[in-house]
Amino acid sequence: MTDRRPLLRAIFDAAVAAAHPDVVLSAHLRPAPKGRVICLAAGKGAAALAVAAEKHYLDTLGLDPSRLTGLATTRHGHGVPTRRIKVIEAGHPVPDEAGLKAADDTLRLAAEATANDLLLVLLSGGGSANWIAPVEGVSFTQKQQVNRALLRSGAPIGEMNIVRKHLSRIKGGRLARAGQRAEIVTLAISDVPHDDPSAIASGPTVPDPSTLADARALVTRYNLTIDDAVRRALEDPRNESCKPGDPAFARAEFEIIAKPKASLDAAVKVARDAGYEVIDFGADLEGEARDIAAEHARLALKAHAEGKRLAIVSGGELTVTVRGNGRGGPNQEYALALADLLKDTSGIVALAADTDGADGGAGSATDPAGAIIDQATFAKMKSLKLDPAAYLANNDATAFFSATGDLLLTGPTLTNVNDVRVILVDPA
C-alpha cells in the first residue's frame, strides 16, 4: 500500500505555512509615527512576529533603530534572534517567573508610551500564559494553580480565558488602559474558535464582554479547586475587565492577520489536489477529543465500506477532560481514540497535530506536535500487545505513540492557528 505519511505531512505543513509571521504580518503594519514604535508581543509566534516587524520598520521603511524598541514574550524554545526588540522565553501552558517579569516590563513600556508613539501589540496563541500579571491579593503560585486546574478541567479555551482575564492586570483590555496615551494597533494571529478578539491572548487591548460573575460561574461549573484569595479576587469589583466605551480604547485598533480558516483552506487544497473528496468540518470545531474521534471514525469507516476516496479535515481546538495521570494533548488523544477504533481496517490513515508544534506536553520545545496513525501503527500495536483503550483511559497518548514510534515532532513552528486533523480514506 502507498505510504500516505508524506501527504499527511504536506497537508499539515501547508496549514502552518499559510500563517507564518513572515507571510502574514508586513502587509498590515502601519506607517512609522512621529515618535517611537514600541512593539509588545506575546505568544508562540511573538519572536517571529517581532523579527517581521523589525524587517518592515528597519529595512523596508529605514526607520532609525533608536526609534524602535519593545519586548516579545514567547514560549520556551520559540525565541529567535532579533535586533531591537528584546525576546523573553517564558512558561506555557503553566506560567513561570520569566512570564511574570515580562508582563510587568510590558505594562511599564506601555505606560511610558507618549501621544506621538505607536504601541504595536502583536499577539498569537499562548499569550495568555506568557503574560502573567496577577491582580492584587493573588500570588503568582495561586495563579499557577488556577491555570493548572483550568487545563485539567476540559473547559474550552474561551471559557478558560474568562477566568484568567478577571485575575489579571494585563488581560481583558488592561494593557490598552496602561498605554492609552499612545496610538495602539493590535495585530493578531487567531488561535481561537470564531476568531473572537477578546479571547486571543485573553484580549489585552480590546473590550471584554465577560464579567466577574461569568468567571465565578465557570469556577462552579467545572468544580475548580481555588484558594480563598482567588475567590475573593473574583468577587472584587475592582477586578472587572475593561468594557466597551472605556477611554482605554479611544485610539486603539485591532486586526486579525491570520485566521485558522485560511490555514485549513490551505490544507484542504492539498488534499483535493491529491484527488480526495473532502469533508471539511471547518476551523471552529470544539468538543471532547475522543468523542470527536469517534464521530470521524464512523464517517471514515462508512466511506471505506463504500469504496470512496475521502479526506476528513477539521480544525478548531478540542479538549480533554483529564481523568488519568498520563501525558498527552488533545491531538494525541484524538489519534489514540482513532487507533482503537480503526485498528482492524486497512486503507485509513490520519494525522492530528497543533500548528504551533506542541500538543499538550510539559512546555518544552521538544514536546510532540501530535501523532500519525497508519498500518505501521496497527502492526506495532499488535507486536507489542498495546491496548489503546487502556492508554486512553489513563490519558497517556504520548506513552502509546512513543512506543509505536508515531509521535509527530516538528519543533516550534513560530505560529499558532489551532489544530489540524486529517483522515485519509483510500479504497481497499
Image (tube, rainbow, N blue to C red):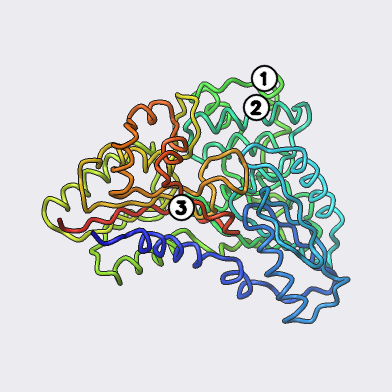
Kind of residue at badge 1: Asp
Q: Disc 2 marks which residue?
A: 145
Structural distance between the alpha carbons of marks 1 and 2:
9 Å
In the image: residue 343, left or right of residue 111:
left
Q: Does residue 149 lie above or below 419 as drawn?
A: above
Q: Can you tell which of label 1 and label 2 is closer to the viewer? A: 2
Q: Nearer the viewer, residue 6 or 70?
A: 6
Q: Earlier in the sequence, mark 1 or mark 2?
A: 2
Give me the residue at 29% from left, 43% from top.
Answer: 379
* Residue 426 falls left or right of residue 160: left
Give the number of the mark in front: 3 or 1: 1
Crowd band around label 1 with a 10 angstrom C-alpha radius: few (<14), some (14–19), many (20+): few
Q: Are marks 1 and 2 in contact (CB under 8 Å)?
A: yes
User: Compared with residue 89, is residue 268 higher up or lower down, i.e. above or below?
Assistant: below
Residue behind mark 3: 194
**What amino acid does circle 3 point to?**
His
Quadrant where the C terminus is found in the figure: bottom left
x%, y% of residue 425? 23, 55
Q: Nearer the viewer, residue 406 or 266?
A: 406
Q: Nearer the viewer, residue 278 or 391?
A: 391
Alpha carbon distance from label 2 to label 3: 28 Å
Label 2 SS = helix
Task: Find numbered disc 3 in the image and state the secondary structure of the residue it sits on.
Answer: helix
Quadrant containing the N terminus is: bottom left
Closest to the camera, between mark 2 and mark 3, is: 2
Closer to the chain start, of discs 3 and 1, is 3
Q: Tell which residue pokes out farthest to the left in this image.
A: 306
SS state under label 1? loop
Mark 1 — residue?
227
